[in-house]
């Protein structure tokens, strides 16, 4: 990653290729994700589900990066001086998005195709993965922080993010995930802290 970063561009933030730990033949992310401010969703984890044997145009995927996936990230010390530390306002999820929005294209985003990380997605807090649904704990921070980033950086997109989140509420109803649907409504009406009550 250091060699790739140094040969890539004078100022960059570098990710890696991440594989599912329990499915090491399947890619979890090529560096990171594409973020859609109008939905508030990291709408496409780049390369997710691709076989390691597939032909991959890494340069094309690299151009689509909105942020580097936090499980593997190499950044220069100057980035911390120029942009600052990762925001602690989020606790979980969207902190990488916040960091890259604050970057404002000062540092180019890239990932090293030869750098491999085997990631136990969702192992610590119950995030959605190939084999498990997301926990209520993970959903709370996902939905709360989506609104937090939108309010902070893209207030013009708040209406469409609320509409998208409402559609996600109805999708939880359709899937009979009553607790998750209730949680989304609570967040839309201002819930800011997580409790299991």
Image: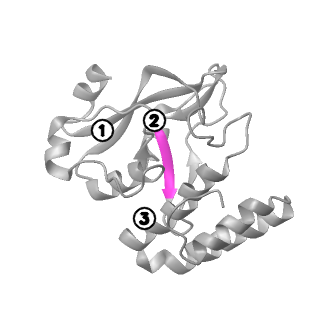
Task: Tell me what residue is drawn at x 20 percent, y 52 percent.
Answer: 83
Compare residues 125 and 35 and report the one nearer the observer: 125
- Is disc 1 placed on a helix, strand or loop? strand
In the rendered structure, which disc, 2 or 3, sits on the residue that comes first in sequence?
A: 2
> Looking at the image, which is closer to me, 167 or 196?
196
Where's residue 143, x and y in %? Answer: 57, 62
Mark 1 and mark 2: span between their CA atoms? 10 Å
Could you tell me which residue is drawn at 15 percent across and 50 percent down? 82
**Residue sitting at the far front:** 197
Which mark is in front, 3 or 1? 3
The percent position of residue 168, horizontal first and vertical second, equals 70, 65
Q: Name the residue beneath numbered marker 2.
A: 31
- Would you say 170 lies left or right of 144 here? right
> Percent x, y for residue 149?
42, 64
Work out whether 171 lies above or below 59.
below
The one nearer the camera, 185 or 33, is: 185
Instruction: Name the residue tied to disc 1.
Output: 13
Residue labelled with disc 3 = 149
Range covered by the magenta-colored residues: 31-35
C-alpha gap between disc 2 and disc 3: 21 Å
């Amino acid at each position: 990653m250091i060699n790739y970063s140094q040969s890539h561009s004078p100022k960059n933030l570098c990710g890696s290729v991440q594989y599912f730990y329990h499915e090491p033949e399947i890619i979890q992310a090529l560096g990171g994700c594409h973020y859609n401010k109008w939905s508030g969703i990291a709408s496409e984890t780049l390369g997710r589900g691709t076989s390691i044997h597939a032909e991959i145009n890494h340069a094309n995927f690299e151009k689509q990066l909105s942020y580097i996936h936090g499980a593997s990230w190499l950044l220069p010390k100057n980035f911390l001086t120029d942009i600052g530390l990762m925001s602690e306002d989020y606790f979980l999820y969207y902190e990488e998005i916040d960091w890259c929005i604050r970057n404002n294209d000062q540092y180019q985003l890239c990932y090293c195709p030869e750098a491999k990380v085997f990631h136990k997605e969702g192992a610590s807090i119950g995030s959605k993965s190939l084999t498990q649904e997301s926990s209520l704990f993970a959903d709370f921070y996902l939905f709360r922080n989506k609104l937090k980033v939108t309010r902070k950086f893209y207030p013009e997109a708040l209406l469409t993010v609320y509409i998208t989140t409402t559609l996600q509420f109805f999708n939880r109803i359709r899937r009979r995930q009553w607790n998750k649907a209730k949680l989304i409504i609570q967040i839309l009406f201002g819930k800011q802290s997580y409790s299991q009550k």
